[in-house]
Each structure stands twice: as C-alpha cells, then as structure tokens.
Amino acid sequence: MGGLAEGAVHVAIIMDGNGRWAKRRGLPRTLGHRAGVETLKSIIEACPELGIRYLTVYAFSTENWKRPKNEVSALMGLLVEYIEKELDHLHRKGVRVQAIGDVEALAEPVRRQLAKAWETTRNNDVLYLQVALNYGGRAEIVGAVKALAEKAREDGDFDIGAIDQEAVRSHMYCPQTPDPDLVIRTGGEYRISNFFLWQIAYSELWVTPLFWPDFTPAHLERALKEYKDRDRRYGGVENA
C-alpha cells in the first residue's frame, strides 16, 4: 500500500457516528467514543504506509458543548487517557501531535496533556497529526480577521490593500499546514459541520455511511484510490 496517496498529502477526517454506532448495539454513547479511539489508532498507524503526511481529525467542535455534560466529560477524559497511554508510541513512530482550535477554553488537565504531547513530538516529521478540539471554522476565520484588525489599529501606516488570502491564512491556527486534499466524513451525513471552511475550498470530499468505529485502513485505502481517479481542476477546465 506504500505511497498510495499520490498527491493526497493531507487527509482530513470528520469522525462521525460514534453515538449512533453505540445506540445500535444498545450501548452507552461513551462506549461508542471509546471504540472510535481504537479506530483512530489504526488509522494513524496506516497513514505513513499509505503516503499521507498530514492527518487532521475533527474531534470536538465548538458546537459539541451542547451535548450532555456527562458525554462531554467522558470525551475529554478519553482524550487525556489516550495521550497518557499512546504518547510514547506516537513519538517512537515519528508522529507530531498538535491541537488546533480554542484550546485555552478546555479544562486544565486536557490543556496540560496537549502541551505535553506537543513538546514531546514537535520535532517529529513522519506524520503531522492535527487534532481539532473546540474547533469551529467560522471562529477560526473571525479570529484571523480580528488579528488583522488589531494589526491595523496598532500600525497607523497599515496598508489595507495588502490584506489578501495569504494575509488571512497567516493568522489561522496552522498556516504552514497545506490545505486538505481529501476530506472524509463517516456516518453518512452530507455536510461540513463548520469544519475547515477556509481550507477545504478545493478539497475532494468522500462520504461513507459507515460509522467511525467501523472505519478501517482498508476503507481509507479505498477513499484514496477513488481520490486518485478524480480530476482536480481548481476552477479550470478538464485537460484536452
């Protein structure tokens, strides 16, 4: 499977369906999230072999705070547990772990573990893993606009005409990360759910009815094969 990505350098995944997976089995939603963590572990392992350099996973949105408090608490506890158990393994595998989103709004134990993961793995370069936590695409764009407005307020000679796409991008969470080539959504829903609204302007989309806990490296391979057969024109016309 090595190098299958062939251009899909950055794959982003909306990991949806944990709760519905558990409900169909008569299990608590929290067990669905735990099963989802196991799926994530297998996908991370598969990415370097498939030629994927960047993996972004949508783990918790700014809207997910509306969920029951016990479920939110369980999700955050799972995150802390995952980092504690897997960090050494991820580091040995050359995975760099970075959180994107309004991380400062998370509980202190979560922030502490995320900081530890970053400090431990920041020099790794086999796979760049971005975990979107308390993330919202609209909030990210608003934050970039506010940063530019603040720069204009502080600098009386600021050239408004210099504000272009690159200027906006430079004030987003990880401006050095290439835009996703392929966005995968599990769970069968055909929507973006406030994820990477700026970055996925020309990303290819691949939706599967599979719930996230049932998603396997073989499904990732299938998505990459279909991606490879698509013609990405970026607003242009098909080659003659």
Image: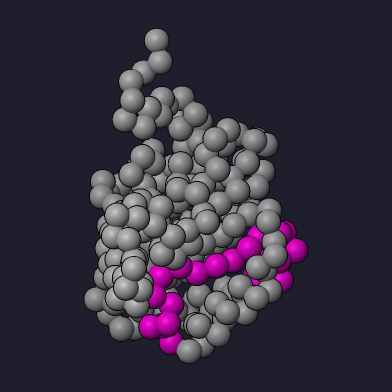
Magenta stretch contains residue 97: yes
Residue at the top extreme? 240
Residue positioned 36% across, 58% down in the render: 168
Residue 101: image x %, image y %?
41, 70
Q: Is residue 10 above or below residue 40?
A: above
Residue positioned 56% across, 59% down in the render: 129
Residue at the right extreme? 92
Q: Is residue 68 left or right of residue 16?
A: left
Residue 127: image x %, image y %?
63, 54
Residue positioned 65% across, 60% down in the render: 95
Number of marks: 0
Q: Quadrant of the N terminus?
A: top right
Q: Is residue 59 left or right of residue 93?
A: left
Q: Which residues are magenta?
A: 85-107
Residue 23: image x %, image y %?
32, 64
Q: Is residue 163 above or below residue 200?
A: below
Residue at the bottom extreme? 108
Which image quadrant for residue 65?
bottom left
Magenta stretch contains residue 127: no
Q: Nearer the viewer, residue 143 or 76?
A: 143
Residue 61: image x %, image y %?
33, 68
Q: Quadrant of the C terminus?
A: top left
Q: Is residue 77 above or below residue 217?
A: below
Residue positioned 44% across, 42% down in the render: 182
